[in-house]
Image (cartoon, grey):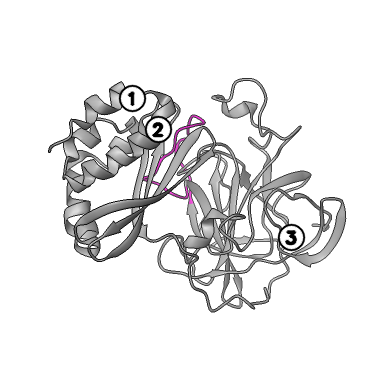
Amino acid sequence: MRIAIALIMAAISAANLEQRAREVVFALAGRQYAELAQNFNPQMLAALPKEKLQSTFEQQIFPQTGAFQKIGDVHRSAQGGFEIFDLTSQFEKGTFDVRVVFDADKKIAGLFVKPANVIAPTKYADYQTKTNLRLPFDGEWTVFWGGRTKEQNYHVIAADQRFAYDFVITRDGVSHHDDAKLNPNYYCWNAPIYAPAAGIVTESVDGIADNVPGEMNPAHAAGNHIVIDHGNGEYSVLAHFRNGTVVPKVGDRVTRGMLIGRCGNSGNSSEPHLHYHLQNGPKFGTGAEGLPAQFVDYIADGKRVARGEPVRLEKILCVDAR
């Protein structure tokens, strides 16, 4: 039976978002692309209009998954005003995770299908960072995502971001004051970001507008960002800079502790924060593999760390001189 997904979604209350997420999966299985697109928020619709949605699933997704069979476990989480549902679903060719993201207006802000949500394999688990990396900011920040488990770090399912971090500034356990829809109300907004080590810039992107908190730009995942070649096959990726603040250009040499931009909310970002990861290639999102990033000379939850990997919810403070 064909499901009138637009009517169902309009009728179901916010308390039943899980049911709405299930209906999204059923609508996909029924190839109801137009109905789904009607429930996308503006950013999602711009990145994935009905025609592109249809071609993506018909030409890329369904040939890999085969026919939909049933939904298994459902995991719900929240981040930056978004409600996220990961639905482990059985298809003809195996088990896949369908992620449905709703924004504050209960519109679809993200829709992803990938093999069952497992930690990406890596041959670099015992890797020791060759570059002496300082934390790329001053003052006390909070590790929002960081660590090697799924509970600590949602990035671990992606090969290039296997050891990535997201950093914010918090006070009294929250990342902003007053109106959560205003970027300047976030404590890390416009904070200076510094090069974690010397190197040559291999990628530099600026000019992407900052999001309204609670919205994302999936068409430009990293937003305004730079990649720095430190030598020895190690490249730092720093992402989501404030529009108009990225300093170095491709080919520029940066020095350790040099100002390279300011913290923003551009790209696939739900609120102002800094994304950082180390990888073994010179471009973002082009098949590079993630490397463990051990920082030097910092304080974590009040204890001095000579060399280490910050983990989720730690309060960290750089004490390394530039």
Q: Residue 92: x percent and y percent?
A: 22, 63
Residue kind at label 3, given as amino acid type: Arg
Prevailing secondary structure of the magenta residues? loop
Viewed as shown, does residue 72 lie left or right of 118? left
- Mark nearer the viewer, 3 or 1: 1
- Point 45% across, 33% down: residue: 215
Distance (Cα) linking label 3 and label 2: 42 Å
Start-end of magenta stretch:
205-222
Residue that carries the numbered disc 1 in the rendered image? 12
Is residue 217 a member of the stretch shown in magenta?
Answer: yes
Looking at the image, can residue 254 be seen? yes
Residue kind at label 2, given as amino acid type: Leu
Answer yes or no: do the residues labelled 1 and 2 have beta carbons within 8 Å?
A: yes
As drawn, the label of residue 134 is: 3
Question: Which label's residue is closer to the chain start, 3 or 1?
Answer: 1
As drawn, the label of residue 17 is: 2
Answer yes or no: do the residues labelled 3 and 2 have beta carbons within 8 Å?
A: no
Distance (Cα) linking label 3 and label 1: 49 Å
Quarter that holds the N terminus:
top left
As drawn, the label of residue 214 is: none
Is residue 185 a member of the stretch shown in magenta?
Answer: no
- Point 35% across, 50% down: residue: 112
